């Protein structure tokens, strides 16, 4: 293998690719929320996922900071795959409960969800 492949494989292993069970995308604004609120939610999301032990192991939750998820109101907007669960108003005060109930217990928080689009399964 060449150096580029080695580097990419090392990074993939470091962030748990191969063991990812969920991927959370969080928009940090600026249209659906202020950047200040979006960044606070993002920092808290990263920390709570790490604290919950979901950054490594057999049940990795990948997280990505998004610039826009095309909703652009009532944010911070969040979507969780593979369930395709779309959340509105994911302000910092909601992040801890989200991580506990959705990511750890596997129970999406119905009152914060405004849309659903599970991805089709692979054959
Ligand atoms: S700016 Fe957040 S969804 Fe568009």
Image: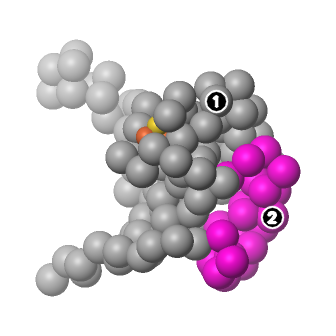
Q: Secondary structure at mark 1?
A: loop
Q: For the magenta stretch, what is the residue range?
A: 90-112
* Residue at point 59%, 48% (across, down): 75
Task: Identify the residue position indicated by label 2 in the image.
Answer: 97
Residue 38 image position (x, y, % from top left): 64, 35
Q: Nearer the viewer, residue 52 or 43?
A: 43
State how the image is colored. Answer: one colour
Task: Identify the residue position indicated by label 1 in the image.
Answer: 34
Total tally of numbered discs in the picture: 2
Q: Nearer the viewer, residue 102 or 59?
A: 102
Q: Which quadrant: the N terminus? A: top left
Above or below — where is 122 with respect to 72? below
Q: Nearer the viewer, residue 80 or 62?
A: 80
Decide whether residue 72 is among the magenta residues: no
Decide whether residue 96 is among the magenta residues: yes
Instruction: Examine the rendering and report whether any part of residue 56 can be seen.
Output: no
Q: Secondary structure at mark 2?
A: helix
Labels 1 and 2: the sequence-earlier one: 1
Q: CA distance from mark 1 to mark 2?
A: 21 Å
Above or below — where is 7 with respect to 28? above
Residue 65 relative to residue 3: left or right? right
């Amino acid at each position: 293998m060449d150096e580029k492949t080695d580097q990419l494989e090392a990074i993939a292993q470091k962030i748990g690719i191969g063991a990812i069970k969920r991927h959370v995308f969080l928009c940090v604004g600026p249209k659906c929320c202020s950047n200040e609120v979006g960044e606070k939610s993002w920092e808290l999301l990263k920390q709570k996922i790490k604290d919950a032990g979901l950054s490594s192991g057999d049940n990795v939750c990948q997280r990505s900071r998004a610039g826009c998820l095309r909703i652009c109101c009532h944010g911070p907007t969040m979507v969780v795959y593979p369930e395709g669960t779309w959340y509105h108003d994911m302000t910092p005060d909601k992040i801890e409960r989200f991580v506990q109930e959705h990511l750890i217990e596997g129970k999406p928080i119905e009152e914060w969800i405004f849309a659903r689009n599970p991805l089709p399964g692979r054959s």
